[in-house]
Amino acid sequence: MPMRKELFKDIKRLVIKVGTAVLASPTVGINDKRIEKIVDEIVDLRQSDQEVILITSGAIGAGMRALGLKERPRTLPGKQAAAAIGQSYLMHLYERCFRKRGYLVAQILLTQDDLTDRKRYLNARHTLMTLLKLNVIPIINENDSVGVEEIKFGDNDTLSALVTNLVGAELLIILSDIDGLYATDPRKRGGDKEDYIRLVEKIDSQTEIEAGGPGEITSTGGMYTKLEAARIVTNSGEPMVIANGKTPRVIRRLLEGEDIGTLFLPRKKKVASRKRWIAFTRRRCGRIFVDEGAKEALKLKGKSLLPSGIVRVEGSFSEGDMVSVSNENEEEFARGLSNYSSLELEKVKGAKTKEVKSILGYKYYDEVIHRDNLVIL
């Protein structure tokens, strides 16, 4: 496909996320041969001077194998115990496979808390960039043995998108057990598995699908989390692909431009690194609703958000928290860091800037969200 060849021809750094359903099955647990094939592909990329960061799921699946479990643990402590046991086993497999091919690996365990804090975010970036310079393969997983929200929501997909932004990668490849994005789950509808969407130019209501549950008893993710990852990556200005990790030479074939998997096209204008962190890594603490005049000023004129354009405030947030900005139809179009708390904004919404001091008794800033801390989606 000419578009794909052109899009991928100069890729120098990419993130590859491998899902549990690719690495494990309910009957045999972790598939050692599958890991070997993935390692072979990554080594091939490195020998072509392409930098690779690997995001791997599978710790809980590996722990199930070690414990002889046939069903995924139902309790949180059970999942955490399986992850704690399986993580070392999984890393041992990767380390052994890469060492045979002459490469060292480095294990990094992350939670979203490690990335929402700006200092820890930058520290993680420095570590990863140093590892790449040393020709080491970084292997990242969520810290499932202590994380609560991560296990519950299966957010290795989201983590892979955040890491793509973290290291400034030019492509995210998510390898799953299906061929791409379907309008409905092919495992449930019994339809033609070749009938999947090859290209998504923009994620909107037409591409939304039912999230459903996990595809395998050893995995936690679903198509919903992959769509969320695609939103993060493409809104930042980079492409993403969902493809079947069981397809032979799938990574190389994708990079050569073969029309396999679902390609999500990026927005034309790339978002700066700090603004990516603001919009997609910080947790959203509330919502600000604005009138059409304010929306136009923010989107088309590059202005800051002033209190006069605010019509409603939702949620409880403090100064410096990340909030979403929506129009009166509740359509989100921006995110940014608020200079005022939700309680303060309830008092000054709709007011002119010069009136803020008389209403609150003080004024921190003229702007509710400065344009330097605002990201248009």
Image: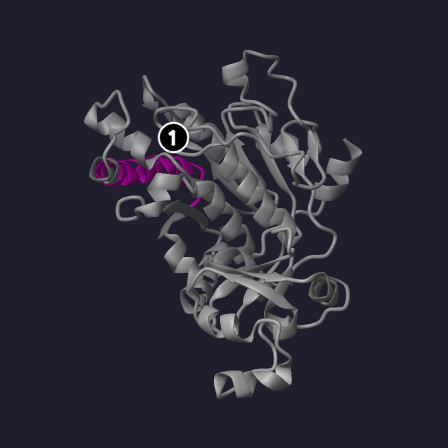
Q: Based on the picture, tell me whether residue 99 belongs to the magenta stretch.
A: yes
Q: Nearer the viewer, residue 304 or 268?
A: 304
Instruction: Provide the residue designation for mark 1.
Output: 219
Q: Based on the picture, tell me whether residue 77 belongs to the magenta stretch.
A: no
**Residue 104 placed where, x, y %?**
40, 47
> Secondary structure of the magenta portion, mostly?
helix
Position of 371 with respect to 17 (left or right) is right
Which amino acid type corresponds to the residue marked 1 in the rendered image? Ser
| For residue 98, above or below residue 163 | above
Q: Which residues are magenta?
A: 81-103
Question: How many residues crowd around disc 1 within 10 Å: few (fewer than 14), some, or many (20 or more)?
Answer: many
Q: State which quarter of the image contains the C terminus.
A: bottom right
Q: Is residue 102 visible?
A: no
**Residue 295 placed where, x, y %?**
70, 62
Q: Is residue 139 visible?
A: yes
**Residue 43 placed where, x, y %?**
52, 39
Residue depicted at x 45% and y 38%: 101
Q: Nearer the viewer, residue 12 or 154?
A: 154
Position of 163 with respect to 11 (left or right) is left
* Occupied quadrant, residue 145: top left
